[in-house]
Image (spheres, rainbow, N blue to C red):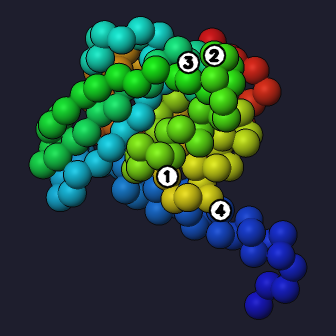
Amino acid sequence: MVTTDGVRDEELERLKSKKLKEMLQGAERRWTAKERIVIPAEDESKLDAKLSGHFGRAPYFAVVELESGGISSVHVVTNESEHFGGFGQAAEAILRLRPSVVIAYSMGPRALSAFRETGVAVLRANADTVKEVVEAYRQGKLEELTEGCLHAHR
């Protein structure tokens, strides 16, 4: 029996990571429920939009809903956080959209923590457009984003 909180926390993180990997591995995912994916984007061109290099500084967010294995809807929302002259953090606004998954190249540690605390999966993007990254997600080819950064990496 482990008695230190640090070890328990590490074990919990290991188990969460293992569960996420199991969910995403293998052939194309089997869809049973509606999912809402939020992806930071450079423009409003929906599935053709280029991904933004950093979550909180993205000018837009593509909101992609999947149902029964296919895309059921796509819409774009403007980032109105304090980075763009508005109020609050981008993560707060996105959480109001009730996403099940956020996919980004990178994000700050506060946003990453906010999503984790509310049970939203955060995955690392591995493609250039919203359409490509959604397809990678559907095929289980994305990995968990495990640490926040202090600046954009791309």
Of callouts 2 and 3, the N-terminal one: 3
Quarter in which the C terminus is drawn: top right
The residue that appears at 59% across and 39% down in the rendered structure is 91
Q: Is residue 40 above or below residue 89?
A: above
Q: Position of residue 62 (x, y in %)?
A: 37, 25
Q: Which residue is mark 4?
A: 13
Answer yes or no: do the residues labelled 4 and 2 have beta carbons within 8 Å?
Answer: no
Q: Which residue is mark 2?
A: 84
Find the distance from the CA under tag 2 to the CA under tag 3. Answer: 9 Å
Of callouts 4 and 2, the N-terminal one: 4
Q: Nearer the viewer, mark 4 or mark 3?
A: 3
State whether residue 94 appears in this view: yes
Find the distance from the CA under tag 4 to the CA under tag 1. Answer: 14 Å
Q: Is residue 53 above or below residue 113?
A: above
Q: Which residue is mark 3?
A: 58
Of callouts 4 and 3, the N-terminal one: 4
Q: Is residue 24 above or below residue 137?
A: below
